[in-house]
Amino acid sequence: MKFSEEIKRRRTFGIISHPDAGKTTLTEKLLLFGGAIQEAGAVKSNKVKKGATSDFMEIERQRGISVATSVLAFEYKNIKINILDTPGHKDFAEDTFRTLTAVDSVIVVIDVAKGVEEQTEKLVEVCRMRNIPMIVFINKLDREGKDAFELLDEIEQKLKLTVTPLSFPIGMGYDFKGIYNIWEQNVNLFTGDPRRDIEETVEISDLSSKELDNLIGEKAAGTLREELELAHGVYPEFNKQDYLDGNLQPVFFGSALNNFGVRELLDCFINIAPTPRPKDSDTRKVLPDEKDFTGFVFKIHANMDPKHRDRLAFIKVVSGKFERNKPYLHVRHGKNLKFSSPNAFFAEKKEIVEVSYPGDIVGLHDTGNFKIGDTLTEGEQLMYKGIPSFSPEHFRYINNADPMKSKQLEKGIDQLMDEGVAQLFTLEMNGRKVIGTVGALQFEVIQYRLEHEYGAKCTYENLNVHKACWIEPENPKGEEFADFKRVKSKYLAKDKRGQLVFLADSAFSLQMAQQKYPSIKFHYTSEF
Ligand code: G4P
């Protein structure tokens, strides 16, 4: 197949949702359609089960699963689909943000009864800021839930999206009869039998036809006609370009558990979802069909086997072909690296692969060369942008609890930070190390992994920090900046890249500092 055709047949996307909305179930049904798995229950949830905070086996179990489900690839109607896994748990939100830099589109899953939930809001906001095309799937229609219009309203309000339904439910919960597929103009009847894999659909291109009444009953048909008319009047006509630009979000209804409405979603998805998109670098925009390979690391996974300390770095191919055993430039290190066993991912396994194309994810064995955001090229000096660090929510001093193992501790902290588990800040005043995390769970993960993977022991000490702000002085040599550094010396630290960070102890002191030093910019992310 020609290079350009390989690019055209790729769709790389992520499924985002609040935990329990049905992401795992939907993923599994998509894989079933692709014939990538044979039975339901094969895809393990990457959820951290309730009460897992103190259960380290649970953390390891979760980590194991998230290695296995990091990338799930399958083929459907000659389209190569790559699903990138995104943890729903809020403590791992940064992982998800980073993964979103590697997707070309997303599917947002919403629970029909719960509507828009907290995590959905946060994740959709990130996608909206990046103009990532989104399709919404409203799930669990077999249960009682909110009215379709009410939900569409809520999505528009809370997620600040412009929606248009491409399917519409006929009844709900106990009365759920099926779905009218606006996109394909047919009715799909719900039998409640998840085992059937060929759906019974009836073409109804003319909504006024008597056939609709015969199919779902006069009353339901009447209601459906009214609702569709209303929807037609209220919501914009679907337009593929608007969707691709991130300005319009089509909505589907269904029940993932019952495998209902999923095929419709998938068929529309392969039709409209973007092929690998161009990506901005620090020097220029890179197009997928360029001849030379470029790619970037968006995720690093430590090996689960403590005897093999190597890691797996996940690279998204942005342009050109990635080939096995060919030397590529590691731009940050300025050195060439060759990879003899790059992995490609399939439903639940990985295999050594000779060639990968734009949109694909390649797993590279890494002995400590990579960190998140690193770029590989065929020699060009460019770095991909768009993997900022956000201010952590929780901060603690990390102390060495075993003086004999300080080297191990240092190495462990270093590598865990490269993986993006947490952020490290070193106080300017005394060199003490502060760990910042998104969730409290990470502190235990770090302590556990330092001990089990690096043989080092640590303890934590509380530290009162409200927010970390990256500092950018207008005039680095000026009087104002010198005064700021003197007065705030206790609160200044360097991040891992050596950038200056202000660890404000309260919202008030941050506000005061902003007022007192107007020529200094306080950034909430590391990229500005
Ligand atoms: P997540 O990955 O988004 O966290 O959600 P997941 O797919 O694990 O689904 C969460 C729960 O919702 C599961 O039930 C799942 O069976 C159920 N579910 C998913 N889709 C549907 C649907 O269309 N209809 C109904 N009624 N339920 C659905 P659970 O009891 O928490 O887990 P399990 O023990 O069944 O696996």
Image (spheres, rainbow, N blue to C red):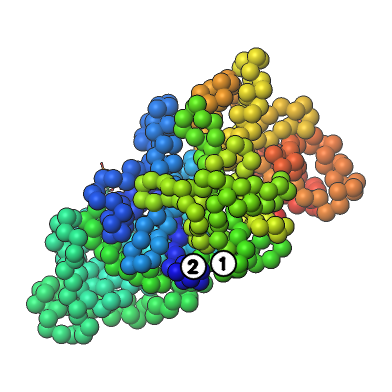
Mark 2 crowdedness (10 Å alpha carbons): few <14, some 14-19, many ≥20: many
Image coordinates for residue 143, horizontal then vertical, percent: 22, 55
Report whether 256 appears left or right of 363. Answer: left
Label 2 sits on a secondary structure element that is helix
Image coordinates for residue 21, horizontal then vertical, percent: 34, 51
Image coordinates for residue 415, horizontal then vertical, percent: 61, 34
Mark 1 crowdedness (10 Å alpha carbons): few <14, some 14-19, many ≥20: many
Say which residue label 2 marks: 7
Given residues 58 and 52, the one toward you in this image is 58
* In this view, 435 is above or below 179: above
The answer as to whether callout 2 falls within 8 Å of ligand 1 is no
Query: Residue visible at 67% across and 52% down?
Result: 329
Query: Residue visible at 14% across and 78% down?
Result: 212
* Residue 8 visible somewhere in the drawing: no
Residue 360, label in figure: none
* In this view, 412 is above or below 373: above
Say which residue label 1 marks: 288
Quarter holding the N terminus is: bottom left
Mark 1 or 2, nearer chain start = 2
Which amino acid is tagged 2? Ile
Query: Circles 1 and 2: CB distance less than 8 Å?
Result: yes
Which amino acid is tagged 1? Pro
Query: Residue visible at 58% across and 34% down?
Result: 416
Given residues 70 and 457, the one toward you in this image is 70
* Residue 348 visible somewhere in the drawing: yes
